[in-house]
Image: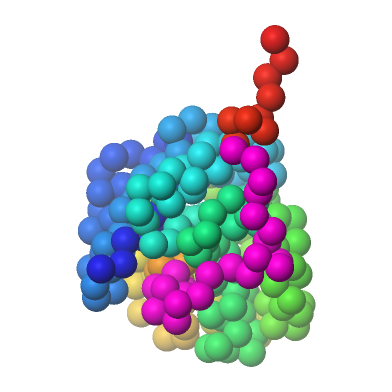
């Protein structure tokens, strides 16, 4: 059986939400166990480049730990794919980013896709990430924000749906989007279901995208190329020096 770590890259994810996401993701893919856990220290939420900087070391620690514990792959459950390249250098098992997985899946289902993210903190991050995937601006022509924090999203889910519908419609009308990517893993399957019913176009949910690509890589028997991601030569704690 495949055993995939779904790594949430923020600290403040409630335990009930972790359990819900774990049950949901494990139920989708046959012969696959998905274990969801969050980093033990770092930013409360992942909402900006600043938050990414705070999360680097604990993300690497958890990815290395996953390989040591016998996981067959790791999926980073964050659309900004923090430290994805570094994670791939650190282990032999496949490491998949929810952002890259979502963007590449988008190219298979539509010729024009828009990202609907939470706030302006992610706009520049996603723009750079999309370019690094080799995807043109004509394929993903816009990244729009619902102007909410993750904490606000978790406390007011009805407003999230309302904002997603409004901003999604603008993307369809103004950028001629034919599919939408949920720009935060916290939006989850409920938001995907509501938007599918409302718009009747592909709505790409990043948690499932990340696990689906990991399952595919495992099934194909391949992992990241060592020519692209040379293995790290040093143990993390040996390389991470603190001044006395």
Q: Position of residue 65 (x, y in %)?
A: 43, 43
Q: Is residue 231 magenta?
A: yes
Q: Nearer the viewer, residue 16 or 115?
A: 16
Vertical comparison of 163 with 110: above or below: above
Quadrant of the drawing holding the C terminus = top right
Q: Nearer the viewer, residue 41 or 158?
A: 41
Q: Residue at x 60, y 85 (%)?
A: 107
Residue 31 lies left or right of residue 110; in this view the side is left
Quadrant of the drawing holding the N terminus = bottom left
Q: Nearer the viewer, residue 240 or 134?
A: 240
Q: Position of residue 20 (x, y in %)?
A: 25, 53
Helix, strand or loop: magenta stretch: loop
Q: Is residue 143 magenta?
A: no
Vertical comparison of 53 with 243: above or below: below
Q: Residue at x 35, y 54 (%)?
A: 70
Vertical comparison of 205 with 39: above or below: below
> Can residue 239 be seen from the camera position used here?
yes
Residue 8 lies left or right of residue 29; in this view the side is right
| Numbered-mark total | 0
Q: Residue at x 45, y 58 (%)?
A: 74
**Image-quadrant location for residue 80:** bottom right
Q: Position of residue 121 (x, y in %)?
A: 67, 48
Residue 127 lies left or right of residue 157; in this view the side is right
Q: Residue at x 53, y 70 (%)?
A: 223
Q: Nearer the viewer, residue 127 or 61?
A: 61
Q: Position of residue 89 (x, y in %)?
A: 63, 54
Q: Residue furthest top?
A: 244
Vertical comparison of 206 with 54: above or below: below
> Can residue 141 be seen from the camera position used here?
no
| Magenta stretch, residue numbers | 212-235
**Image-quadrant location for residue 139:** bottom right
């Amino acid at each position: 059986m495949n055993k995939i770590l779904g790594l949430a890259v923020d600290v403040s994810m409630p335990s009930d939400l972790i359990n819900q996401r774990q049950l949901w993701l494990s139920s989708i893919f046959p012969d696959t166990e998905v274990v969801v856990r969050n980093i033990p220290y770092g930013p409360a939420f992942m909402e900006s480049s600043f938050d990414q900087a705070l999360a680097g070391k604990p993300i690497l620690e958890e990815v290395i730990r996953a390989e040591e514990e016998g996981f067959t792959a790791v999926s980073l459950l964050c659309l900004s794919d923090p430290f994805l390249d570094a994670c791939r250098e650190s282990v032999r098992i496949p490491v998949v980013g929810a952002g890259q997985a979502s963007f590449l899946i988008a190219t298979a289902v539509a010729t024009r896709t828009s990202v609907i993210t939470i706030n302006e903190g992610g706009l520049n991050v996603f723009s750079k990430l999309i370019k690094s995937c080799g995807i043109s601006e004509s394929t993903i022509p816009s990244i729009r924000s619902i102007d909410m924090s993750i904490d606000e999203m978790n406390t007011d889910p009805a407003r999230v749906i309302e904002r997603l519908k409004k901003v999604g419609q603008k993307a369809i009308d103004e950028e001629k989007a034919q599919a939408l990517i949920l720009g935060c893993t916290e939006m989850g399957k409920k938001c995907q279901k509501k938007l599918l019913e409302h718009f009747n176009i592909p709505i790409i949910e990043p948690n499932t995208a990340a696990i689906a690509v990991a399952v595919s890589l495992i099934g194909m028997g391949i992992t990241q190329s060592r020519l692209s991601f040379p293995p790290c030569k040093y143990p993390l704690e040996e390389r991470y020096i603190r001044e006395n």
